[in-house]
Amino acid sequence: MDEAAEKQDFPGIPIVTVGMPVFNGGRYLKLAVNSIIQQTFTKWELIIIDDGSTDDAIAEIRNITDIRIRIIEDGLNKGLAARLNQAIDLARGRFFARMDQDDISYPDRFERQLDILNREPNLDVVSVQGIFISEFGEAISRIPFSQTHEQICATPWNGFRFPHPTWLGRIEWFQYYRYAEPGPFFCEDQELLLRSHTTSRFATVSHVLFAYRVRSKKKFRRVFRTRSTLLELQIRYFIWHKKPHYALLSLLMFFILIAKDVWWHIKQELKIKTINRTQNEDDLEREWKVVLSRLAEN
């Protein structure tokens, strides 16, 4: 049976539910959806929840006639955390996967994540390695990552290297912990990890299977507010759990990261380029171009 026929013959209960909240998805949304359609693992459902968008991005994907895709619209703007909890409540799969509206999943992402989860029943959530891509689809660099649970959770006062859009985990874990509502400002994932890391098990697939889109210009005020929100969460958590030294380390890292943000902003304003490409990054770019060309064909 060819892949197209297999997709159309799969109306049953999915194994993976993919939650994709969308707010003004723009020109990248269709590519993101197509990257799910092209997964080598086919027993999934994609729940696209429009969070009160004002652009026409949702209209552009209505002509995709894949029976595994559900589009939900209510005209309201509730925020990412609320929409993810809504997707979790609607999920029929045994596993729940995250996907953002402007990123790209490589074709074998789900297959490799499920392979690890099925082999290691003690794991709750698995992420994948990824690369940063520009607004124009150019590969920039590898995303820093940690592979084992111990590495991911080694420095909770410095956050968790566990990229949110790449998560795939057991639905029971998401149902138990859920996302905090209202979601802390752009910190939904870090708040959830901070709250759950001591009683959970995480891991990262040792392959690049995801492309995370970044904007050429960051809004410094938004970055500062995000870091401030995370600092508040960390201090409250560590004080409550009687770890004042971790609270102090969180404060120290806050100032270090803000200094880095300021320097990055200065470099952007002065147009200073400090990227030195390596052979490994060139290989990553070639692999990314293959993925992108396949998506462009559909």
Image: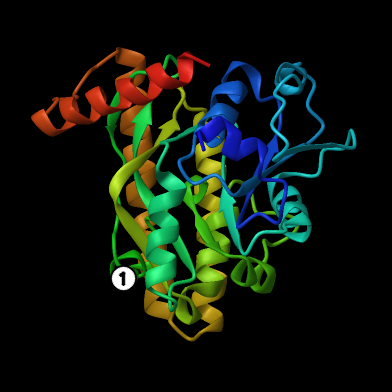
State the scheme by which the image is colored: rainbow
For image coordinates 82% across by 32% down, the residue present is 52
Of residues 161 and 291, the one drawn nearer to the viewer in this rendering:
291
Q: Quadrant of residue 92?
A: bottom right
Q: How many marks?
A: 1
Q: Which residue is mark 1?
A: 154
Residue furthest front as drawn: 1
Q: What SS does tag 1 mark? A: loop
For image coordinates 23% across by 31% down, the residue present is 284
For image coordinates 89% across by 33% down, the residue present is 75
For image coordinates 59% across by 46% down, the residue present is 186
Of residues 104 and 158, the one drawn nearer to the viewer in this rendering:
104
Residue type marked 1: Ala
Of residues 173 and 265, the one drawn nearer to the viewer in this rendering:
173
Where 199 sits versus 31, above or below?
A: below
Q: Residue 279, how many percent across, how many down? A: 9, 29
Q: Quadrant of residue 288?
A: top left
Residue 187 visible in image: no
Q: Residue 205, how many percent across, how many down? A: 33, 55
Where 16 sits versus 54, above or below?
A: below
